[in-house]
Image: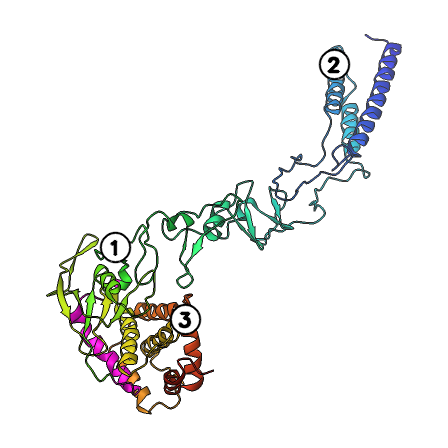
């Protein structure tokens, strides 16, 4: 048996160890609890610079991180306690009340009033973030900052295609974001001939050509690479819409082809309608002037044989002929048909023209749209009317200018039938005749647009005779009326001011 002295020593030793252990354990938990919810003595950092995506640092589930050293010390203390129990002899113990006291002391030290149970509270960093697209909280997930606003990565989308923007670089227009490729599709002009992005020049600038009326944009190189140009509307041929070859070096777009007049027989009704237009303005043509539709080569040959007259270069589309000549006019039994991109079935027939009055014939290029053919006929018929009425020795600016005014007025009556030009001293039947001739059949929007283009061509011609002459004549007619203007030209050879 163990005597009382030894038992007392053992009890004293055990109590001392227990006291030291409890003090150490209490100190350990106090030091560990003081850093609760803090990492390294500092609050967690949430980074979100402009146009960058940052990942939030991970946090422990209970918000109370412990160092590895503290964990090792606690494990070591528990192991020492267990080792002491194993060293005690069998049959000797301190009773259940002693063990219960130790257990209760440990439990109390862990749950003292100075350390209330941990309840995690939400942490809101300064400048709490809401997604600028979906308006939902971003929280602690990944986010992107742009334009002073924050977005979920999946909410930052291209304004054009609607897909998320994941690239490091993107384009902005106002507050709208775009993929760089989508923004280029929207803003970088494409050539309407080759349908490629118009390249930049040596200075890094986008350089292109643009038609002043149709606003057709195209690469500068297409002005020199033999791309076909419509001989009527002047638009360049697109690579996905081929033009029709007229066989004399000219090409015609499909829109102009719809109303093209191909031979002399088809043009007779239009010719007589324009004569009626002149008669409605008290400008009746007393003699029947022959009219022929011809190829470009035949027209050029007739121009060379004509001694008088001023011709619009580089392209002359009509001619009022005064000399006796033999020309080849276009005659077909039926409308020519297409074979690939060319017209077949066109025939020319030589015809001798004799002079029976001051005017021998009127020649017009074949294959042009109805409104352009009519505008040319009106111009050339005005030349014929001036010669038949004895107007002599007029300057090119005066004669071509007043002829262009009649061409422009006829187009006005066709394109804008409700428009009445102020024509002083003309008969009351002039406007009604002009209006009636223009209402024969409705016109498509395409044909009306072509008519507006032909009027634009006349108004913006840059040549001295056809351009400046038209603007001076048109100003006089608008101010004084057609009749007074013509009388002034007969007396003075100039326009009234």
Percent across and percent down for residue 347 are 13, 61
Residue 58 found in image quarter: top right
Q: CA distance from mark 2 to mark 3?
A: 113 Å
Mark 3 Cα-neighbour bin, 10 Å: few <14, some 14–19, many ≥20? some
Task: Give the label, 2 or 1, closer to the camera.
Answer: 1
229 on left or right of 133: left
- Where residue 459 is drawn, which disc sits there? 3
Residue 251 appears in view: yes
Nearest to the observer: residue 485 or residue 146: 485
Residue named by callout 1: 249
Residue at left offset 24%, top offset 68%: 364
Q: Mark 1 falls on what kind of element?
A: loop
Q: Mark 2 falls on what kind of element?
A: helix
- Tell me where the magenta segment starts and ends, as one range: 257-284
Percent across and percent down for residue 145 are 62, 46
Q: Quadrant of the N terminus?
A: top right
Residue named by callout 2: 83
Q: CA distance from mark 1 to mark 3?
A: 27 Å
Q: Earlier in the sequence, mark 2 or mark 3?
A: 2
Are dots 1 and 3 in contact, CB under 8 Å?
A: no
484 on left or right of 354: right
Mark 2 Cα-neighbour bin, 10 Å: few <14, some 14–19, many ≥20? few
Nearest to the observer: residue 233 or residue 80: 233
């Amino acid at each position: 048996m163990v005597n009382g002295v030894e038992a007392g020593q053992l009890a004293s030793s055990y109590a001392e160890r227990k006291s030291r252990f409890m003090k150490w354990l209490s100190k350990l938990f106090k030091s560990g609890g003081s850093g609760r919810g803090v990492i390294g003595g500092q609050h967690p950092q949430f980074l979100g610079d402009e146009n960058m995506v940052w990942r939030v640092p991970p946090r422990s589930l209970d918000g109370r991180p412990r160092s590895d050293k503290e964990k090792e010390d606690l494990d070591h203390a528990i192991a020492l306690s267990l080792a002491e129990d194993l060293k005690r002899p069998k049959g000797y113990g301190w009773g259940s009340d002693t063990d219960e006291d130790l257990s209760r002391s440990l439990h109390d030290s862990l749950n003292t009033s100075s350390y209330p149970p941990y309840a995690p509270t939400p942490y809101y960093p300064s400048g709490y973030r809401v997604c600028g697209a979906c308006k939902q909280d971003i929280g602690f997930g990944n986010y992107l900052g742009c334009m002073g606003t924050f977005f979920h990565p999946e909410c930052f989308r291209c304004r054009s295609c609607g897909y998320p923007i994941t690239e490091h670089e993107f384009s902005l227009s106002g507050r709208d974001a775009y993929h760089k490729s989508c923004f280029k599709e929207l803003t970088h002009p494409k050539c309407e001939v080759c349908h490629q992005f118009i390249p930049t020049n040596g200075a890094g600038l986008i350089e292109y050509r643009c038609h002043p009326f149709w606003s057709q944009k195209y690469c500068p190189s297409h002005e020199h690479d033999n791309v076909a140009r419509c001989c009527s509307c002047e638009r360049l041929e697109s690579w996905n819409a081929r033009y029709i070859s007229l066989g004399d070096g000219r090409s015609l777009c499909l829109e102009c082809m719809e109303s093209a007049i191909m031979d002399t027989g088809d043009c007779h009704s239009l010719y007589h309608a324009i004569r009626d237009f002149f008669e409605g303005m008290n400008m009746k043509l007393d003699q029947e002037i022959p009219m022929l539709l011809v190829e470009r080569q035949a027209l050029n040959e007739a121009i060379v044989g004509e001694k008088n007259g001023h011709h619009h270069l580089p392209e002359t589309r009509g001619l009022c002929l005064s000399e006796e000549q033999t020309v080849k006019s276009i005659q077909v039994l039926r409308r020519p048909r297409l074979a690939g991109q060319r017209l077949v079935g066109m025939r020319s027939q030589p015809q001798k023209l004799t002079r029976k009055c001051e005017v021998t014939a009127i020649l017009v290029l074949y294959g042009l749209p109805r409104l352009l053919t009519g505008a040319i006929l009106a111009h050339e018929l005005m030349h014929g009317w001036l010669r038949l009425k004895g107007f002599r020795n007029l300057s090119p600016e005066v004669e071509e200018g007043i002829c262009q005014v009649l061409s422009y007025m006829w187009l006005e009556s066709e394109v804008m039938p409700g428009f009445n030009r102020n024509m002083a001293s003309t008969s009351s039947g002039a406007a009604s005749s002009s209006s009636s001739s223009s209402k024969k059949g409705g016109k498509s929007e395409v044909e009306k647009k072509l008519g507006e283009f032909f009027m634009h061509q006349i108004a913006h011609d840059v040549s001295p005779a056809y351009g400046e002459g038209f603007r001076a004549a048109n100003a006089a007619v608008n101010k004084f009326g057609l009749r007074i203007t013509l009388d002034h030209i007969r007396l003075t050879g100039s326009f009234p001011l």
